[in-house]
Amino acid sequence: MGHWKCHEQLERELAEYVGKEAALVFSTGMQTNLGTISALVSRGDVVILDKDDHASIVDGARLSWGETKRFRHSDMKDLEHVLSAIPDKKGKLVVVDGLYSMGGDIAPLPEIVPLCKKYGARLMVDDAHAIGVLGGGRGTAAHFGMTDQVDLIMSTFSKSFASLGGFIAGDEPVVHYIKHFARSLIFSASIPPANAAAALAALDVMRTEPERIQRLLDIAEYMRKSYRELGFNTLQSTTPVIPILIGDTMRTIGVWKMLFDNGVFVNPVLSPGVPEGQELLRTSYMATHTDEQLDRVLSVFEQVGKQMD
Ligand SMILES: Cc1ncc(COP(=O)(O)O)c(C=O)c1O
């Protein structure tokens, strides 16, 4: 499968949407992270990851010739501790998720950006869960009004774009460099034109129907508040990814089954997806969920909650 006009159009429109000079489309989000990180981080460089970063970021770092360091999840003291210990002359790339897929919390870019500047590090944000959701749809950097201060924005088409593929966006020379050094791009087929067209159509909906994004945020607000009122622990979530902490493998599977048998599907997240003792049910929402559906979910959770006691 080749690189067609529709891929180029998608790249132009994505770059414009997230506020960057250029974008490059890969076959999946996984391949985007593998190719981008391994292309940019060379021997002698250091890539610095949040401990909760997505597996594709971790694997991108493993594929690179550089050294990997990790800091405690969104812990700015620990990030500074790690950055300050790296010699000035080494190239540094910090990679964080914009919206964390398990906790539903947002990376504190207003604190991460100044630290990157202080220690001469570049910043890449994986916005797989944030494009189409935060910042009017344009992602985490836009949410904080910091698009110009984030070097690279990555995302996937497998979430809000309802397609398949991924992209990286940034300054034109950097994207050009990635295009010629990312092995997962060079040695793999492009997405089929139908997937590119689907992603373009989704982008069009994001741009022209902002009421859908608002509806999604309203749903998330309502559900988070309702779960908390029912006594469930939704951790630090402030977004449409709402975890329900259960804290034990067998109990999580048991609750998942009770919900499933009552017509509610959620994702059970077990160790090693989360640390032992942090097992949870991940609930996530679509703008097309109706009020009736949401209230039905809440009433099933209420019944199941009573049986858990
Ligand atoms: C944060 C994050 N990054 C990257 C990916 C990989 O994207 P893809 O499914 O397109 O490979 C995912 C999930 O699928 C993800 O949640």
Image (cartoon, rainbow, N blue to C red):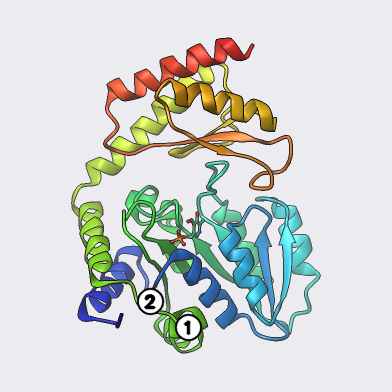
Name the residue beneath numbered marker 1: 178
Name the residue beneath numbered marker 2: 24
Q: Can residue 234 be seen from the camera position used here?
A: yes
Residue 258 placement (x, y as % from top left)? 52, 21
For mark 2, give the secondary structure: strand
- Give 164 or 10, whichever is nearer the viewer: 164
- Give 13 or 165, whichever is nearer the viewer: 165
Going 22% across and 75% down the picture, which residue do you hit? 6
Residue 205 placement (x, y as % from top left)? 21, 52
Going 41% across and 30% down the picture, which residue do you hit? 221
For mark 1, give the secondary structure: helix
Asked if 180 appears above or below 265 in the picture, the reply is below
| Of the image marks 1 and 2, the number of the one nearer the N terminus | 2
Going 49% across and 78% down the picture, which residue do you hit? 184
Mark 1 touching mark 2, by CB under 8 A?
yes
- What mark, if any, has residue 284 been given in the picture? none
Q: Quadrant of the C terminus?
A: top right
Going 18% across and 52% down the picture, which residue do you hit? 208
For this view, does 272 lie left or right of residue 192?
right
Mark 2 belongs to which amino acid? Leu
Asked where in the image residue 204 lies, by quadrant, the reply is bottom left
Dot 1: few (<14), some (14–19), or many (≥20) neighbours within 10 Å?
many
